[in-house]
Amino acid sequence: MTDTNVDDIPKAHETVYRTFLSGKTRPLSWRRAQIKQLGFLVQDNEDAFCKALEQDLGRSAFETTAAELIPIKAEINDVCDHFEKWAKPQKAKTSLTWVAAKPVVYSEPKGVALVIGTWNYPITLLLTPLLGAISAGCTALVKPAEQAPATAALIASLLPKYLDPSAFICILGAIPQSTALLKLRFDHIFYTGSGGVGRIVAKAAAEHLTPVTLELGGKSPAVVLDDADVEVVARRIVWAKFVNAGQICISTDYVLTTPAMEPKLIAAMKRALATFSAPAPGEAQTSLLHNASYPRIVNANHFKRVSKLLEGTKGEVVVGGKTDAAENKIEVTIVRNVKGDDSLMSEEIFGPVLPIVTHPDVDSMIRFIQDRETPLALYVFTQSNKKRQYIFERTRSGGFVQNDVLVQFMIPGLPFGGTGQAGYGNYHGRRTFDAFSHERAFASVPTWMDSILALRYPPYSPKKLKML
Ligand code: NAD
């Protein structure tokens, strides 16, 4: 599929703008039909999505199904089951004076939305915000990430077949298309990706005073204390670097642990990685670089970026370290003796390299975290709820999980989003609907209330002041 012609973008915007103004997207019955269609879009094309991700990231059908298709279907079902309740006008709890004005809060569609997706989970990170826009009664332009071209092309081909093409249009392309989109006026922009581009999006949105949700990244630490269950911790942390080859915004970017725990943890991580790298039944043993379950780095640019971070480290590589430039593959690589000023600590790794930083006690670990940008996720491994709480109360992060990784994205009921440099706004479940909705205040003040309200009219007098 070819990229959208930049000159056609204003026309697409005009189409969805006119559709929104026509009122077509407001009825709940229309929204429900579109939500169901989105469900069919996913359900009917699961194989095609798995194949597209195999092309884009060398990712297995298991991972695509577990990490994208199942979560997006769960989100669609949740929204389908509840959005009518969320959209119901809510009577405001008010004071006695205003009861007669029957104040109500209406959840109204914001209007025309722009959704810009990213490539690491190119289905769910694009379709979940789109689901929010549909359920709230908005129209939308969606731009999938060009770095996952097979998935982007698949979504562009499916969208007009399943959804109303006058309300939802897919724009294919890269920076020229994004730049053209950002010149236009939207009523909400939902952006997922890097902080650098997040700034570009936020600046462009400010020109039109458009509200923005920014789902960005950062360096998310895993704090491993001495009382942690080392085998379980190792398995969970290594898994977060194996899945999608660590190209996950909430992957464990680095480990903070004590000098006493470090050797035990490394030994257990080696065992965990050996288990993960074992051939599936019927498959021959290969090195991790050629393991069918292990994805590749998305493209040569990101391969070079992660390789450079690894080459620059002053730490000691204790696991992995091999790369294959022809295939854009990097082994799960664990590096110990990493200091705060190391290349591996200079930016979010967003790949399968795991630095380990040691600190003698919890307080110096907390200071290490506090001295850096607020992470999108903070993982703390300890059997002690008291120690966990001690860390929780002294740090900030988008999400916080004790004794596991990544699950905050999946657990129904939890908001997903960052704070500080990890972004602002959040979504999942009802919050996805809220992100695209405006709470419109409504009151109908009976004329007879002037008998009560007379006090507010001039002329003012000392007597009136006393009556306030
Ligand atoms: P990126 O930010 O370069 O690209 C993402 C999107 O931005 C693409 O659609 C791209 O076309 C668009 N884009 C790129 N340059 C642009 C420009 N100059 N103007 C307008 N749009 C532009 O992607 P990346 O840096 O490879 O993504 C990785 C980052 O995304 C990591 O920091 C990761 O943590 C973050 N991320 C966050 C989440 C989350 O949910 N919080 C999820 C996935 C990834």
Image (cartoon, rainbow, N blue to C red):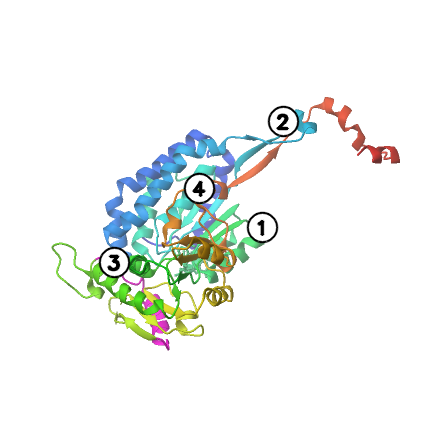
Residue 102's disc is: 2
Indicate the position of residue 250 as horizontal and vertical percent values.
39, 56
In the visual, does 113 lie left or right of 383? right
Query: Marks 1 and 3: in contact by CB < 8 Å?
Result: no
Measure how far apart labels 2 and 4 are at the Cα level. 29 Å
- Relative to residue 144, is residue 101 depicted above or below? above
**Which numbered disc, 2 or 3, marks the residue that appears first in the sequence?**
3
Q: Is residue 214 magenta?
A: no
Indicate the position of residue 33 as horizontal and vertical percent values.
38, 32
The residue that label 3 is drawn on is 58
* Disc 3: CA contacts within 10 A as few (<14), some (14-19) or many (>=20): many
In the visual, does 9 lie left or right of 460? left
Residue range highlighted in magenta: 293-315
The residue that label 1 is drawn on is 209
**Which numbered disc, 2 or 4, marks the residue that appears first in the sequence?**
2
Which of label 3 and label 1 is nearer to you? 3
